[in-house]
Image (cartoon, coloured by chain):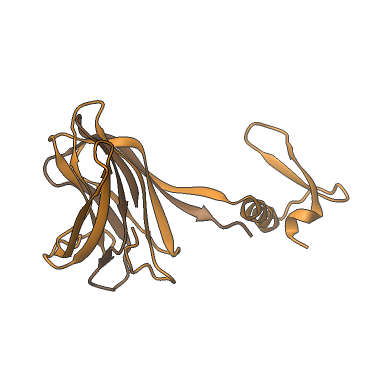
Chain colours: A orange, B brown
Amino acid sequence: MALKDSFTTIRYFTSTDIYFFTTDNRPLTDLKACADFLADTMDARGGWALISSGTASNSTTLDFIGLTGYSAYWFMITDPLVPVTNAVDLWIRISQDNGSTFKSGGTDYTYESYEVLASNTSAINSASTGAAQLIAAATVGNSAANGIGGLFRIGSIVQPLKINDL
Amino acid sequence: MLLNRFNGTNHATSFGGGNYVTDQNAINAVRFMFSSGNISTGTVKCLRIITII
C-alpha cells in the first residue's frame, strides 16, 4: 500500500500551512512522512516539475547550470526567443564544468535536423558531423511577431547526463 | 527537439535527431544563444518529468 493510501485528507487551515491527517484522524507531525505523502501523490499523478527558468532581456545567452541528478531535462521555450539581429540561427552549447566554459570546438558537436516550411512541401535538411554548436533552428526573425518557440530535450539512457538527445 | 519559428516570411517547424556531443564526459549545463547578436526577449524553462507509476 502506498503511503498516500493511509491518509484520508489534506486539510488547509491557512493560506500557508497544510495539515495532514491519518485514516483515524490523528494529525501527522512527522515531516518526512508528509514529504513522502506528497511525493507519492505527485508520482501517481505524473506531470512536469519546474527546475529553473530564464528570461532574456537583451541577453548574450540563457544558461542553465547544475543539471545533475536526472537522466533527462526538458527545455520549454514558453515565450518565444526573439533575436536582436534578424535571420540568425538558434545555437545550443553544453558545459561539462557547470557553466565555467561551454564546448565550442570545431568538432565538438554532431547535429541533424529537418525543417518543414509552411510554404514548401519538402523538408530542408541541416546537418554536420563536426561543428562548434548544435544548430537548433535557422534564420529566426527579429521583429516582435517573430521568434522561435518549442521544446528541446537533453538526456541519456542512464546517469550521468552524457548524450545530447534532441 | 520540436521547434517552431517565424522570420516574417516563413513559418517553419524543425525536428531534430541524432545529435550528440563528441566528449562523452558528463554534461551539467546548457546554453541557448543566437549565432549573432543578443537575445532580445523570451523565456526558457528547465523542466523534468515526474514519472507516472
The quarter of the rendered structure image containing the N terminus of chain A is bottom right
* Above or below: residue A75 compared with residue A141: below
Q: Position of residue A10 (x, y in %)?
A: 74, 42
Side of A2 where A113 appears, left or right: left
User: In front: A5, or A120?
Assistant: A120
Q: Residue at x 84, y 49 (%)?
A: A26
Q: Residue at x 24, y 40 (%)?
A: A120
Side of B53 where A103 appears, left or right: left
Furthest residue toward top: A144
User: In front: B10, or A153?
Assistant: B10
Q: Position of residue A132 (x, y in %)?
A: 14, 60
User: In front: A98, or A88?
Assistant: A88
Q: Residue at x 32, y 70 (%)?
A: B26
Query: Which corner quadrant of the image does residue A57 belong to?
Result: top left
Q: Residue at x 14, y 47 (%)?
A: B35
The quarter of the rendered structure image containing the C terminus of chain A is bottom left
Residue A96 visible, this angle: no
Query: Which corner quadrant of the image does residue A107 belong to?
Result: bottom left
Q: Position of residue B21 (x, y in %)?
A: 25, 67
Q: Position of residue A158 (x, y in %)?
A: 44, 72
Circle count: 0
* Above or below: residue B53 compared with residue B32: below
Residue A68 visible, this angle: yes
Furthest residue toward front: A121
